[in-house]
Image (cartoon, grey):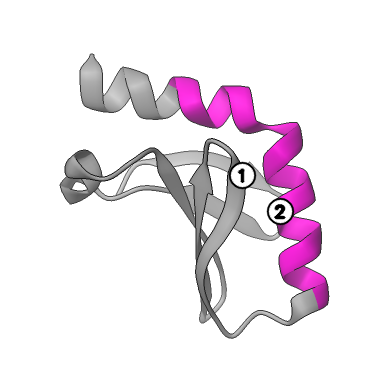
Amino acid sequence: MPTVLKIGPYRLFFYASDRGEPPHIHVEREDNIAKFWLNPVRLQSSGGFSRLEIGRIQKRLSENQRESLEAWNEYFRG
């Protein structure tokens, strides 16, 4: 599970087995986890985060979309 980025209390990562899916990122904080598609940035699934927090996470992901997509492409196509 390579960590792509840490933003505040959030760890952004993907699984090596994610190769066959469209680019996405998993976000975790404590026991909460969410999955966001990266192009465009949108929520795919969530467990434990409030709607307000999901909105904040999505905003931060949008601000870091390019970096996340580059990390995805480097890992899976590199």
Q: Is residue 75 above or below residue 22?
A: above
- Residue 67 in picture, x, y percent from top left: 58, 24
Query: In front: 43, or 66?
Result: 43
- Residue 43 in picture, x, y percent from top left: 58, 61
Query: In front: 67, or 3?
Result: 67
Quarter of the view holding residue 10: bottom right
The residue sitting at 68% across, 32% down in the picture is 64
The residue sitting at 72% across, 57% down in the picture is 57
**Which residue is identified by label 2?**
58
- Closer to the chain start, of discs 1 and 2, is 1
Q: Secondary structure at mark 2?
A: helix
Q: Which mark is residue 41?
A: 1
Q: Secondary structure at mark 1?
A: strand
Query: In front: 70, or 5?
Result: 70
- Quarter of the picture containing the C terminus is top left
The residue sitting at 24% across, 27% down in the picture is 76
Q: Residues within 10 Å of mark 1 (few under 14, many from 20)?
A: some
- Residue 73 in picture, x, y percent from top left: 35, 21
Which residues fall within the magenta stretch? 52-70
Q: Is residue 64 found inside the magenta-colored segment of the image?
A: yes
Q: Main secondary structure of the magenta part?
A: helix
- Label 1 – label 2 distance at C-alpha: 7 Å
- Residue 71 in picture, x, y percent from top left: 43, 25
Viewed as shown, does residue 47 lie left or right of 64?
left
The mark tally for this picture is 2
- Amino acid type, label 1: Val
